[in-house]
Image: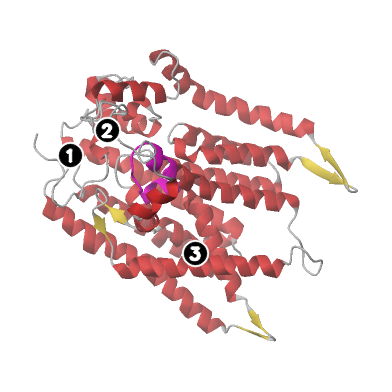
Protein backbone atom coordinates (compact mmCIF):
# COMPACT_ATOMS: atom_id res chain seq x y z
CA UNK A 1 0.00 0.00 0.00
CA UNK A 2 2.87 2.37 0.78
CA UNK A 3 4.35 1.65 -2.65
CA UNK A 4 1.07 2.58 -4.31
CA UNK A 5 0.75 5.84 -2.35
CA UNK A 6 4.29 6.78 -3.31
CA UNK A 7 3.55 5.97 -6.96
CA UNK A 8 0.30 7.94 -7.27
CA UNK A 9 1.81 10.97 -9.12
CA UNK A 10 3.61 8.82 -11.72
CA UNK A 11 0.72 6.36 -11.86
CA UNK A 12 -1.66 9.22 -12.71
CA UNK A 13 0.61 10.44 -15.53
CA UNK A 14 1.09 6.87 -16.77
CA UNK A 15 -2.64 6.12 -16.96
CA UNK A 16 -3.71 9.54 -18.20
CA UNK A 17 -0.99 9.66 -20.86
CA UNK A 18 -1.96 6.25 -22.22
CA UNK A 19 -5.67 7.12 -22.28
CA UNK A 20 -5.07 10.45 -24.04
CA UNK A 21 -2.88 8.90 -26.75
CA UNK A 22 -5.27 5.99 -27.37
CA UNK A 23 -8.28 8.30 -27.38
CA UNK A 24 -6.58 10.69 -29.80
CA UNK A 25 -6.16 7.84 -32.27
CA UNK A 26 -9.74 6.71 -31.68
CA UNK A 27 -11.05 10.17 -32.57
CA UNK A 28 -9.05 10.78 -35.75
CA UNK A 29 -8.70 7.43 -37.54
CA UNK A 30 -11.02 6.92 -40.52
CA UNK A 31 -13.20 3.84 -40.58
CA UNK A 32 -13.20 2.93 -44.27
CA UNK A 33 -10.35 2.65 -46.78
CA UNK A 34 -8.73 5.98 -47.61
CA UNK A 35 -6.43 5.42 -50.59
CA UNK A 36 -3.67 6.27 -51.20
CA UNK A 37 -2.91 6.98 -47.52
CA UNK A 38 -4.80 4.01 -46.02
CA UNK A 39 -4.95 5.60 -42.57
CA UNK A 40 -7.82 3.31 -41.53
CA UNK A 41 -7.16 0.52 -39.01
CA UNK A 42 -6.91 -2.98 -40.54
CA UNK A 43 -10.30 -4.62 -41.18
CA UNK A 44 -12.11 -2.32 -38.75
CA UNK A 45 -14.93 -1.71 -41.22
CA UNK A 46 -15.54 -5.49 -41.30
CA UNK A 47 -15.32 -5.88 -37.52
CA UNK A 48 -17.56 -2.88 -36.91
CA UNK A 49 -20.38 -4.58 -38.83
CA UNK A 50 -21.00 -6.76 -35.77
CA UNK A 51 -21.57 -4.07 -33.10
CA UNK A 52 -23.59 -2.17 -35.71
CA UNK A 53 -25.83 -5.22 -36.18
CA UNK A 54 -26.27 -5.63 -32.41
CA UNK A 55 -27.01 -1.91 -32.05
CA UNK A 56 -29.64 -2.05 -34.79
CA UNK A 57 -31.37 -5.35 -33.96
CA UNK A 58 -30.66 -5.88 -30.27
CA UNK A 59 -29.71 -9.52 -30.94
CA UNK A 60 -26.49 -11.40 -31.66
CA UNK A 61 -25.69 -12.24 -35.29
CA UNK A 62 -25.08 -15.86 -36.25
CA UNK A 63 -22.44 -14.90 -38.81
CA UNK A 64 -24.61 -16.07 -41.69
CA UNK A 65 -26.41 -12.75 -42.19
CA UNK A 66 -25.55 -10.70 -45.25
CA UNK A 67 -25.29 -7.59 -43.03
CA UNK A 68 -22.21 -8.90 -41.23
CA UNK A 69 -20.56 -10.61 -44.19
CA UNK A 70 -17.25 -9.11 -45.36
CA UNK A 71 -17.50 -7.95 -49.00
CA UNK A 72 -15.20 -9.94 -51.25
CA UNK A 73 -14.34 -12.49 -48.56
CA UNK A 74 -17.83 -13.89 -47.98
CA UNK A 75 -17.07 -14.69 -44.34
CA UNK A 76 -17.78 -12.83 -41.12
CA UNK A 77 -15.96 -12.02 -37.89
CA UNK A 78 -19.26 -12.90 -36.18
CA UNK A 79 -18.37 -16.57 -36.67
CA UNK A 80 -15.60 -16.23 -34.12
CA UNK A 81 -15.61 -14.99 -30.52
CA UNK A 82 -17.27 -11.59 -30.26
CA UNK A 83 -17.60 -10.69 -26.57
CA UNK A 84 -15.97 -7.23 -27.04
CA UNK A 85 -18.33 -6.55 -29.95
CA UNK A 86 -21.28 -7.51 -27.76
CA UNK A 87 -20.22 -4.95 -25.15
CA UNK A 88 -19.72 -2.33 -27.87
CA UNK A 89 -22.99 -3.14 -29.64
CA UNK A 90 -25.22 -2.89 -26.60
CA UNK A 91 -23.46 0.25 -25.37
CA UNK A 92 -24.00 1.75 -28.83
CA UNK A 93 -27.66 0.74 -28.58
CA UNK A 94 -27.89 2.66 -25.29
CA UNK A 95 -26.17 5.74 -26.76
CA UNK A 96 -28.51 5.47 -29.75
CA UNK A 97 -31.40 6.30 -27.42
CA UNK A 98 -30.03 9.84 -27.19
CA UNK A 99 -28.46 10.42 -30.60
CA UNK A 100 -28.58 9.05 -34.14
CA UNK A 101 -25.09 10.37 -34.91
CA UNK A 102 -23.10 7.64 -36.67
CA UNK A 103 -19.83 9.24 -35.60
CA UNK A 104 -20.86 9.12 -31.92
CA UNK A 105 -21.77 5.45 -32.25
CA UNK A 106 -18.37 4.68 -33.78
CA UNK A 107 -16.63 6.63 -31.02
CA UNK A 108 -18.64 4.70 -28.45
CA UNK A 109 -17.41 1.39 -29.84
CA UNK A 110 -13.81 2.55 -29.98
CA UNK A 111 -13.96 3.99 -26.45
CA UNK A 112 -14.76 0.53 -25.10
CA UNK A 113 -11.35 -0.64 -26.29
CA UNK A 114 -9.66 2.47 -24.91
CA UNK A 115 -11.17 1.50 -21.55
CA UNK A 116 -9.93 -2.08 -21.95
CA UNK A 117 -6.46 -0.62 -22.55
CA UNK A 118 -6.60 1.62 -19.49
CA UNK A 119 -7.69 -1.29 -17.33
CA UNK A 120 -4.82 -3.33 -18.80
CA UNK A 121 -2.45 -0.52 -17.78
CA UNK A 122 -3.68 -0.87 -14.19
CA UNK A 123 -3.13 -4.64 -14.32
CA UNK A 124 0.39 -4.20 -15.72
CA UNK A 125 1.17 -1.84 -12.85
CA UNK A 126 -0.08 -4.44 -10.34
CA UNK A 127 2.08 -7.08 -12.06
CA UNK A 128 5.10 -4.78 -11.79
CA UNK A 129 4.58 -4.49 -8.02
CA UNK A 130 4.90 -8.27 -7.79
CA UNK A 131 7.94 -8.60 -10.07
CA UNK A 132 10.22 -5.62 -9.45
CA UNK A 133 11.51 -4.26 -6.15
CA UNK A 134 13.52 -1.49 -7.82
CA UNK A 135 11.11 1.36 -8.54
CA UNK A 136 13.04 2.50 -11.60
CA UNK A 137 12.75 -0.85 -13.38
CA UNK A 138 9.18 -1.29 -12.21
CA UNK A 139 8.14 1.82 -14.10
CA UNK A 140 10.32 0.91 -17.07
CA UNK A 141 8.40 -2.36 -17.34
CA UNK A 142 5.04 -0.56 -17.15
CA UNK A 143 5.91 1.97 -19.84
CA UNK A 144 7.65 -0.64 -22.03
CA UNK A 145 4.42 -2.67 -22.14
CA UNK A 146 1.74 -0.01 -22.34
CA UNK A 147 3.56 2.65 -24.36
CA UNK A 148 4.74 0.33 -27.09
CA UNK A 149 3.26 2.20 -30.09
CA UNK A 150 1.52 -0.88 -31.47
CA UNK A 151 -0.08 -1.62 -28.11
CA UNK A 152 -1.61 1.85 -27.96
CA UNK A 153 -2.84 1.41 -31.53
CA UNK A 154 -4.56 -1.91 -30.77
CA UNK A 155 -6.63 -0.22 -28.04
CA UNK A 156 -7.84 2.58 -30.31
CA UNK A 157 -10.19 0.86 -32.79
CA UNK A 158 -12.82 -1.86 -32.97
CA UNK A 159 -11.27 -5.34 -32.55
CA UNK A 160 -11.14 -8.25 -30.10
CA UNK A 161 -7.36 -8.03 -29.57
CA UNK A 162 -7.70 -5.25 -27.00
CA UNK A 163 -9.87 -7.34 -24.67
CA UNK A 164 -7.55 -10.31 -25.21
CA UNK A 165 -4.50 -8.32 -24.07
CA UNK A 166 -6.36 -7.27 -20.93
CA UNK A 167 -7.17 -10.94 -20.34
CA UNK A 168 -3.50 -11.97 -20.61
CA UNK A 169 -2.59 -9.35 -17.99
CA UNK A 170 -5.26 -10.64 -15.64
CA UNK A 171 -4.15 -14.26 -16.03
CA UNK A 172 -0.47 -13.44 -15.52
CA UNK A 173 -1.27 -11.40 -12.41
CA UNK A 174 -3.35 -14.24 -10.96
CA UNK A 175 -0.66 -16.84 -11.72
CA UNK A 176 2.12 -14.79 -10.13
CA UNK A 177 0.11 -14.19 -6.97
CA UNK A 178 -1.04 -17.82 -6.94
CA UNK A 179 2.52 -19.13 -7.08
CA UNK A 180 3.70 -16.71 -4.41
CA UNK A 181 0.92 -16.96 -1.84
CA UNK A 182 -1.23 -19.87 -2.97
CA UNK A 183 -4.38 -20.01 -5.04
CA UNK A 184 -6.62 -18.22 -2.61
CA UNK A 185 -10.15 -17.26 -3.59
CA UNK A 186 -9.08 -13.78 -4.74
CA UNK A 187 -6.38 -15.16 -7.05
CA UNK A 188 -8.71 -17.86 -8.39
CA UNK A 189 -11.37 -15.27 -9.24
CA UNK A 190 -8.85 -13.10 -11.09
CA UNK A 191 -7.67 -16.11 -13.07
CA UNK A 192 -11.28 -17.08 -13.87
CA UNK A 193 -12.03 -13.58 -15.13
CA UNK A 194 -8.93 -13.60 -17.33
CA UNK A 195 -9.70 -17.05 -18.76
CA UNK A 196 -13.29 -16.08 -19.53
CA UNK A 197 -12.32 -12.85 -21.29
CA UNK A 198 -9.61 -14.64 -23.26
CA UNK A 199 -11.88 -17.54 -24.24
CA UNK A 200 -14.57 -15.14 -25.47
CA UNK A 201 -12.27 -12.82 -27.41
CA UNK A 202 -9.27 -14.25 -29.28
CA UNK A 203 -8.13 -17.77 -30.23
CA UNK A 204 -4.48 -16.74 -30.68
CA UNK A 205 -4.06 -16.24 -26.93
CA UNK A 206 -5.49 -19.62 -25.88
CA UNK A 207 -1.94 -20.66 -24.99
CA UNK A 208 -2.37 -18.61 -21.81
CA UNK A 209 -5.41 -20.68 -20.85
CA UNK A 210 -3.37 -23.84 -21.35
CA UNK A 211 -0.59 -22.35 -19.20
CA UNK A 212 -3.08 -21.48 -16.46
CA UNK A 213 -4.22 -25.11 -16.41
CA UNK A 214 -0.69 -26.56 -16.38
CA UNK A 215 0.65 -24.15 -13.77
CA UNK A 216 -2.36 -24.61 -11.52
CA UNK A 217 -2.21 -28.42 -11.68
CA UNK A 218 1.56 -28.62 -11.07
CA UNK A 219 1.41 -26.11 -8.21
CA UNK A 220 0.08 -28.84 -5.90
CA UNK A 221 3.12 -31.08 -6.33
CA UNK A 222 4.83 -31.10 -2.93
CA UNK A 223 8.24 -32.38 -1.86
CA UNK A 224 8.44 -34.07 1.55
CA UNK A 225 11.93 -35.27 2.55
CA UNK A 226 12.87 -35.87 -1.06
CA UNK A 227 9.63 -37.66 -1.90
CA UNK A 228 7.12 -36.07 -4.26
CA UNK A 229 3.51 -35.96 -3.13
CA UNK A 230 0.39 -34.50 -4.67
CA UNK A 231 -2.22 -32.51 -2.78
CA UNK A 232 -5.28 -33.89 -4.55
CA UNK A 233 -7.68 -32.50 -1.99
CA UNK A 234 -6.71 -28.84 -2.45
CA UNK A 235 -6.28 -29.19 -6.21
CA UNK A 236 -9.76 -30.64 -6.66
CA UNK A 237 -11.32 -28.15 -4.25
CA UNK A 238 -9.86 -25.12 -6.04
CA UNK A 239 -9.97 -26.73 -9.47
CA UNK A 240 -13.69 -27.49 -9.33
CA UNK A 241 -14.33 -23.95 -8.05
CA UNK A 242 -12.41 -22.44 -10.98
CA UNK A 243 -13.91 -24.84 -13.53
CA UNK A 244 -17.50 -24.11 -12.50
CA UNK A 245 -17.00 -20.33 -12.73
CA UNK A 246 -15.22 -20.55 -16.10
CA UNK A 247 -17.84 -22.89 -17.55
CA UNK A 248 -20.63 -20.60 -16.37
CA UNK A 249 -18.80 -17.68 -17.97
CA UNK A 250 -18.14 -19.21 -21.40
CA UNK A 251 -20.58 -22.09 -21.96
CA UNK A 252 -23.46 -19.83 -23.03
CA UNK A 253 -21.46 -18.59 -26.00
CA UNK A 254 -20.20 -21.93 -27.28
CA UNK A 255 -23.64 -23.54 -26.77
CA UNK A 256 -25.12 -20.64 -28.75
CA UNK A 257 -22.64 -21.22 -31.59
CA UNK A 258 -23.20 -24.97 -31.48
CA UNK A 259 -26.94 -24.43 -31.96
CA UNK A 260 -26.92 -21.71 -34.64
CA UNK A 261 -24.02 -23.20 -36.64
CA UNK A 262 -25.17 -26.83 -36.60
CA UNK A 263 -22.50 -28.09 -34.22
CA UNK A 264 -19.62 -25.90 -35.42
CA UNK A 265 -18.98 -24.32 -32.01
CA UNK A 266 -15.61 -22.85 -33.08
CA UNK A 267 -16.88 -21.43 -36.36
CA UNK A 268 -13.98 -22.65 -38.52
CA UNK A 269 -15.94 -25.06 -40.73
CA UNK A 270 -18.72 -22.52 -41.37
CA UNK A 271 -16.14 -19.88 -42.19
CA UNK A 272 -14.58 -22.12 -44.85
CA UNK A 273 -17.98 -22.96 -46.35
CA UNK A 274 -18.97 -19.31 -46.65
CA UNK A 275 -15.61 -18.44 -48.17
CA UNK A 276 -15.99 -21.18 -50.76
CA UNK A 277 -19.48 -19.94 -51.65
CA UNK A 278 -19.04 -16.17 -51.69
CA UNK A 279 -15.36 -15.19 -51.73
CA UNK A 280 -13.63 -13.83 -54.80
CA UNK A 281 -11.04 -16.09 -56.42
CA UNK A 282 -8.07 -14.33 -54.84
CA UNK A 283 -9.12 -15.29 -51.29
CA UNK A 284 -11.36 -18.29 -51.97
CA UNK A 285 -9.94 -21.44 -50.26
CA UNK A 286 -10.72 -23.45 -53.40
CA UNK A 287 -8.79 -21.23 -55.80
CA UNK A 288 -6.42 -19.03 -53.77
CA UNK A 289 -2.71 -19.73 -53.73
CA UNK A 290 -0.84 -20.11 -50.46
CA UNK A 291 2.82 -20.83 -49.87
CA UNK A 292 1.86 -24.30 -48.70
CA UNK A 293 -0.13 -25.03 -51.89
CA UNK A 294 2.70 -23.70 -54.07
CA UNK A 295 5.14 -26.17 -52.48
CA UNK A 296 7.29 -23.61 -50.66
CA UNK A 297 8.90 -24.42 -47.34
CA UNK A 298 8.32 -22.17 -44.35
CA UNK A 299 11.94 -21.05 -44.54
CA UNK A 300 11.57 -20.11 -48.22
CA UNK A 301 8.50 -18.02 -47.38
CA UNK A 302 10.36 -16.23 -44.61
CA UNK A 303 13.33 -15.44 -46.83
CA UNK A 304 11.31 -14.35 -49.85
CA UNK A 305 8.97 -11.97 -48.07
CA UNK A 306 11.39 -10.65 -45.42
CA UNK A 307 8.96 -11.94 -42.83
CA UNK A 308 11.07 -11.32 -39.73
CA UNK A 309 11.83 -7.65 -40.43
CA UNK A 310 8.25 -6.81 -41.41
CA UNK A 311 6.82 -8.66 -38.43
CA UNK A 312 9.25 -6.89 -36.11
CA UNK A 313 8.44 -3.44 -37.47
CA UNK A 314 4.70 -4.02 -37.31
CA UNK A 315 5.07 -5.39 -33.77
CA UNK A 316 6.71 -2.12 -32.71
CA UNK A 317 4.74 0.42 -34.76
CA UNK A 318 2.62 0.05 -37.90
CA UNK A 319 -0.57 2.09 -37.97
CA UNK A 320 -3.39 2.35 -40.45
CA UNK A 321 -3.63 -0.62 -42.80
CA UNK A 322 0.08 -1.39 -42.40
CA UNK A 323 0.70 1.93 -44.15
CA UNK A 324 1.99 4.30 -41.45
CA UNK A 325 5.41 3.55 -39.99
CA UNK A 326 7.63 5.37 -37.55
CA UNK A 327 11.12 6.74 -38.08
CA UNK A 328 13.91 4.24 -38.71
CA UNK A 329 15.64 5.33 -35.52
CA UNK A 330 12.75 3.99 -33.43
CA UNK A 331 12.99 0.47 -34.85
CA UNK A 332 16.78 0.52 -34.49
CA UNK A 333 16.52 1.73 -30.90
CA UNK A 334 14.04 -1.02 -30.04
CA UNK A 335 16.37 -3.61 -31.59
CA UNK A 336 19.17 -2.36 -29.34
CA UNK A 337 16.84 -2.44 -26.33
CA UNK A 338 15.64 -5.98 -27.05
CA UNK A 339 19.13 -7.34 -27.80
CA UNK A 340 20.54 -5.74 -24.66
CA UNK A 341 17.71 -7.11 -22.56
CA UNK A 342 18.18 -10.62 -23.97
CA UNK A 343 21.91 -10.38 -23.26
CA UNK A 344 21.02 -9.45 -19.69
CA UNK A 345 18.79 -12.53 -19.42
CA UNK A 346 21.69 -14.77 -20.47
CA UNK A 347 23.93 -13.02 -17.94
CA UNK A 348 21.24 -13.64 -15.32
CA UNK A 349 21.06 -17.34 -16.22
CA UNK A 350 24.83 -17.78 -16.12
CA UNK A 351 25.06 -15.89 -12.87
CA UNK A 352 22.51 -18.22 -11.26
CA UNK A 353 24.91 -21.12 -11.95
CA UNK A 354 22.23 -23.75 -12.35
CA UNK A 355 24.65 -26.64 -12.47
CA UNK A 356 26.72 -25.77 -9.42
CA UNK A 357 25.85 -25.31 -5.76
CA UNK A 358 27.51 -21.93 -5.30
CA UNK A 359 24.27 -20.04 -6.06
CA UNK A 360 20.63 -20.76 -5.34
CA UNK A 361 19.19 -22.91 -8.07
CA UNK A 362 15.74 -22.34 -9.46
CA UNK A 363 13.15 -24.65 -7.99
CA UNK A 364 11.25 -26.99 -10.28
CA UNK A 365 8.14 -24.83 -9.94
CA UNK A 366 10.03 -21.65 -10.85
CA UNK A 367 11.57 -23.28 -13.90
CA UNK A 368 8.19 -24.63 -15.02
CA UNK A 369 6.65 -21.18 -14.57
CA UNK A 370 9.32 -19.58 -16.75
CA UNK A 371 8.95 -22.32 -19.37
CA UNK A 372 5.24 -21.55 -19.52
CA UNK A 373 5.91 -17.85 -19.97
CA UNK A 374 8.31 -18.68 -22.82
CA UNK A 375 5.57 -20.84 -24.33
CA UNK A 376 3.20 -17.83 -24.13
CA UNK A 377 5.81 -15.73 -25.97
CA UNK A 378 6.44 -18.17 -28.79
CA UNK A 379 2.95 -19.59 -29.35
CA UNK A 380 1.56 -16.42 -31.05
CA UNK A 381 4.69 -16.26 -33.21
CA UNK A 382 4.24 -19.88 -34.32
CA UNK A 383 0.56 -19.27 -35.08
CA UNK A 384 1.37 -16.14 -37.11
CA UNK A 385 3.87 -18.09 -39.22
CA UNK A 386 1.41 -20.94 -39.69
CA UNK A 387 -1.41 -18.63 -40.80
CA UNK A 388 0.94 -16.87 -43.20
CA UNK A 389 2.11 -20.18 -44.65
CA UNK A 390 -1.11 -22.21 -44.82
CA UNK A 391 -3.83 -19.55 -45.16
CA UNK A 392 -3.22 -15.95 -46.22
CA UNK A 393 0.14 -14.23 -46.08
CA UNK A 394 -0.14 -11.54 -43.39
CA UNK A 395 3.03 -11.16 -41.37
CA UNK A 396 1.51 -8.56 -39.08
CA UNK A 397 3.27 -8.08 -35.77
CA UNK A 398 0.02 -7.18 -34.02
CA UNK A 399 -0.83 -10.91 -34.09
CA UNK A 400 2.13 -11.44 -31.73
CA UNK A 401 1.00 -8.84 -29.16
CA UNK A 402 -0.34 -11.50 -26.73
CA UNK A 403 3.33 -12.24 -25.99
CA UNK A 404 3.99 -8.62 -24.97
CA UNK A 405 3.86 -8.82 -21.16
CA UNK A 406 6.17 -11.83 -20.62
CA UNK A 407 8.49 -10.60 -23.38
CA UNK A 408 8.90 -7.17 -21.79
CA UNK A 409 9.31 -8.73 -18.35
CA UNK A 410 12.36 -10.68 -19.51
CA UNK A 411 13.77 -7.70 -21.40
CA UNK A 412 13.47 -5.35 -18.41
CA UNK A 413 14.65 -8.04 -15.97
CA UNK A 414 17.68 -8.53 -18.21
CA UNK A 415 18.40 -4.80 -18.11
CA UNK A 416 18.03 -4.85 -14.33
CA UNK A 417 20.52 -7.70 -14.02
CA UNK A 418 23.00 -5.93 -16.31
CA UNK A 419 22.80 -2.86 -14.07
CA UNK A 420 24.13 -4.95 -11.18
CA UNK A 421 27.03 -6.47 -13.13
CA UNK A 422 30.30 -6.52 -11.20
CA UNK A 423 33.85 -5.89 -12.39
CA UNK A 424 35.86 -7.37 -9.58
CA UNK A 425 34.92 -5.28 -6.54
CA UNK A 426 33.25 -2.58 -8.59
CA UNK A 427 29.72 -2.15 -9.91
CA UNK A 428 28.35 0.27 -12.45
CA UNK A 429 27.93 3.76 -10.95
CA UNK A 430 24.31 4.62 -10.15
CA UNK A 431 24.38 7.94 -12.12
CA UNK A 432 25.39 6.02 -15.27
CA UNK A 433 22.55 3.54 -14.77
CA UNK A 434 20.08 6.38 -14.27
CA UNK A 435 21.22 8.06 -17.49
CA UNK A 436 20.75 4.80 -19.41
CA UNK A 437 17.30 4.35 -17.90
CA UNK A 438 16.40 7.93 -18.79
CA UNK A 439 17.34 7.16 -22.40
CA UNK A 440 15.09 4.09 -22.32
CA UNK A 441 12.16 6.14 -21.05
CA UNK A 442 12.88 8.80 -23.68
CA UNK A 443 12.87 6.14 -26.40
CA UNK A 444 9.62 4.55 -25.23
CA UNK A 445 7.58 7.66 -24.42
CA UNK A 446 9.11 9.99 -27.01
CA UNK A 447 8.87 7.43 -29.79
CA UNK A 448 5.21 6.78 -29.04
CA UNK A 449 4.31 10.47 -28.90
CA UNK A 450 6.10 11.04 -32.20
CA UNK A 451 4.27 8.11 -33.80
CA UNK A 452 0.82 9.12 -32.57
CA UNK A 453 0.87 12.92 -32.54
CA UNK A 454 3.36 13.90 -35.22
CA UNK A 455 3.00 11.09 -37.75
CA UNK A 456 -0.34 9.31 -37.58
CA UNK A 457 -2.82 12.06 -36.69
CA UNK A 458 -1.62 14.43 -39.46
CA UNK A 459 -1.97 11.59 -41.99
CA UNK A 460 -5.44 10.77 -40.66
CA UNK A 461 -6.45 14.41 -41.04
CA UNK A 462 -5.17 14.47 -44.63
CA UNK A 463 -7.01 11.22 -45.39
CA UNK A 464 -10.36 12.85 -44.80
CA UNK A 465 -13.47 12.26 -42.76
CA UNK A 466 -13.62 9.61 -40.04
CA UNK A 467 -16.86 8.34 -41.57
CA UNK A 468 -16.80 8.46 -45.35
CA UNK A 469 -20.06 9.11 -47.20
CA UNK A 470 -21.69 6.01 -48.64
Tag 1 secondary structure: helix
Report which residue position mark 1 lands on.
Answer: 103
Q: Residue 61: horizontal and vertical position, in percent?
A: 31, 21
Q: Earlier in the sequence, mark 1 or mark 3?
A: 1
Circle 2 residue: 283
Toward the right, the furthest residue is 225
Direction from residue 46 to residue 269 in the image, left or right:
right
Q: Is residue 298 above or below residue 437?
A: above
The percent coordinates of residue 190 (x first, y second) are 57, 40
Q: Is residue 234 magenta?
A: no
- Residue 39 picture location, percent across and down: 20, 50
Residue furthest out toward the front: 295
- Kind of element beneath mark 2: loop
Other-residue count near label 3 (Cα within 10 Å), few / some / many at <14 / 14–19 / ≥20: many
- The single residue placed furthest to the bottom in the displayed view is 425
Label whose residue precedes the other's in the sequence (2 or 3): 3
Q: Residues within 10 Å of mark 2 (few under 14, many from 20)?
A: some
Of labels 2 and 1, earlier in sequence is 1
What's the magenta region? 384-402
Left or right: residue 272 versus residue 206 is left
Mark 2 against mark 3, which lies toward the viewer? 2
Amino acid sequence: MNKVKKDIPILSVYLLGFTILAMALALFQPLADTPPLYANPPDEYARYLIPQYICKHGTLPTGLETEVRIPGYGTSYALYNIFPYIVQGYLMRFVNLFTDSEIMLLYTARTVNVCFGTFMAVMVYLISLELFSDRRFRWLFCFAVMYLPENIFIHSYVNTDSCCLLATAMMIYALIRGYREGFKTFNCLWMCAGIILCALSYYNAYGYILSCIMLFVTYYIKSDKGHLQYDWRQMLKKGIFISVIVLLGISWWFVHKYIVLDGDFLGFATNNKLAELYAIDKVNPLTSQTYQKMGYTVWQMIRERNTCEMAFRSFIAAYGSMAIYSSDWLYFAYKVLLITGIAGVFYWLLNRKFFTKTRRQLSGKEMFFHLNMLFCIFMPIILMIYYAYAMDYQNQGRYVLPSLIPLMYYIVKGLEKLSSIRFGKYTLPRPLINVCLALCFLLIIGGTIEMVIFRTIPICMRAGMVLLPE
